[in-house]
């Protein structure tokens, strides 16, 4: 397998992982989200290496590098857009959870106030110490 083919396959894997990441966010599968993000981190290192190898390969064979790079830039642009969508979705989920948590905390404070209003204070057991 040549470097360009390996790079194209790495970008396909990036797409698959980004789509899995989005599905994990939508379903609240945080373990899958974390696994997808770890895999994406490792894949980015591999893509960096494959990109350098691919450019060397193109130079060696006298390929029109700018045309090839344009093709890959389009793919990268689509992948980055998918990552931005995932980030936006994750932000919306976080905000929703934060709002629910705030509401629950307020409800807890209200319940404590109600409890104090209806439950009589205990009188001290000792009224004098002698």
Image (cartoon, rainbow, N blue to C red):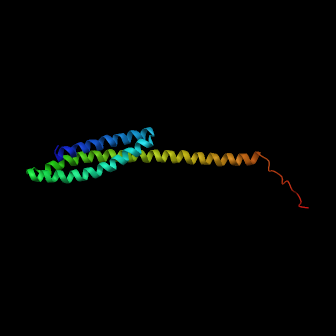
**Looking at the picture, how far across and down is residue 6, in whole percent?**
21, 44
Q: Is residue 12 left or right of residue 115?
A: left
**Looking at the picture, how far across and down is residue 89, in whole percent?**
41, 44
How many labels sit on residues? 0
Instruction: Name the residue rendered at 22%, 50% in the picture.
Output: 50
**Looking at the picture, how far across and down is residue 23, in whole percent?**
39, 38
Task: Find residue 25 and report its image quarter.
Answer: top left
Instruction: Name the residue rendered at 29%, 45% in the picture.
Output: 79
The extreme left residue here reads: 62
Q: Is residue 59 left or right of residue 106?
A: left
Q: Is residue 120 left or right of residue 3?
A: right
Indicate the quadrant containing the N terminus: top left, top right, bottom left or bottom right.
Answer: top left
Q: Is residue 110 left or right of residue 33?
A: right
Instruction: Name the residue rendered at 28%, 42% in the picture.
Output: 13
Determine whether 42 is above or below 29 in the image. below
Task: Find residue 24 and report its image quarter.
Answer: top left
């Amino acid at each position: 397998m040549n470097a360009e083919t390996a790079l194209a396959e790495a970008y396909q894997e990036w797409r698959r992982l980004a789509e899995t990441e989005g599905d994990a966010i939508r379903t609240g599968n945080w373990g899958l989200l974390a696994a997808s993000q770890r895999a994406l981190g490792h894949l980015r290192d591999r893509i960096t290496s494959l990109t350098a190898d691919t450019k060397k390969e193109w130079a060696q064979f006298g390929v029109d590098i700018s045309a090839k790079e344009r093709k890959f830039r389009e793919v990268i642009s689509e992948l980055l857009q998918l990552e931005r969508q995932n980030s936006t979705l994750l932000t919306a989920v976080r905000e929703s959870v934060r709002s629910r948590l705030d509401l629950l905390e307020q409800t807890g404070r209200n319940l404590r106030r109600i409890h104090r209003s209806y439950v009589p204070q205990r009188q001290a057991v000792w009224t004098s110490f002698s």
